[in-house]
Amino acid sequence: MIRPEDISIRTEFRQGDISAILSLHSEIYGKEYGYNMNFEAVVAKSLHEFYELYKPDRSRVWLCEHDGRIVGSVALLDRGEAAQLRYFVLLPDYRGLGLGNRLMTLYMNFMREVGYTSSYLLTTDDLSEAAHLYKKFGFELVSSTESDAYGDRLHRQRYEWRIED
């Protein structure tokens, strides 16, 4: 049985982390949602961008590890005034352990600590559990557009969070 205390979360990049994040996305979104190779290519391209723009004082990656294997992640990419939430994914066996809440709390705390006044994320409408978590942390759906870029027709969505005055 997997216990939350058996999972560590680290924030420094290591050799192989980018390919591990890509592999998690390809495996989960292909298997669970039927996303095609276009999705994998989009994630690969964005991971390259994330690495090129990575500034440890303004950007961050959180990698969940269990028994030496990356089992989940989330990242914050510096977009100037805004922070972009990226690569939020957990293997099925690691869901329901509170890791999603833990990762979102780490994300929100770092975002505030660095001084961001807003954040956004791009997702799809078939990820309802993730959307529930985003809303719990104050993100609001601001747009939704139909797309078939990843295979079946779905809605690409944008959620935003703004600091309250």
Image (spheres, grey):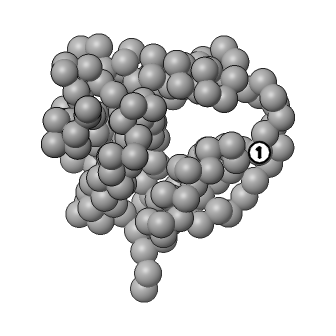
The front one of 81 and 124 is 124
Residue at figure coordinates x 72%, y 58% from the top left: 143
Q: Quadrant of residue 159?
A: bottom right
Residue on which the image places disc 1: 155
Residue extending farthest to the bottom is 165
83 is higher (above) or lower (below) than 67: below
Q: Position of residue 114 (x, y in %)?
A: 26, 60
Q: Is residue 39 visible?
A: no
Q: Position of residue 77 (x, y in %)?
A: 40, 43
Q: Is residue 111 left or right of residue 132?
A: left
90 is higher (above) or lower (below) than 84: above
Q: Position of residue 16 (x, y in %)?
A: 29, 14
Residue at figure coordinates x 33%, y 51% from the top left: 98
Residue at figure coordinates x 22%, y 39% from the top left: 3
Q: Is residue 133 left or right of residue 140?
A: left
2 is higher (above) or lower (below) than 142: above
Q: Position of residue 145 (x, y in %)?
A: 80, 48
> Which quadrant is home to the N terminus?
top left
Q: Is residue 133 left or right of residue 147?
A: left
Q: Quadrant of residue 72?
A: top left
Q: Is residue 26 visible?
A: yes
For the residue marked with disc 1, what is the amino acid?
His
Mark 1 is surrounded, within 10 Å at the Cα level, by few (under 14), some (14 to 19) or many (20 or more) other residues, namely some
Q: Say which element carries label 1.
A: strand
> Which quadrant is home to the C terminus?
bottom left
Residue at figure coordinates x 26%, y 34% from the top left: 2
The front one of 67 and 88 is 67
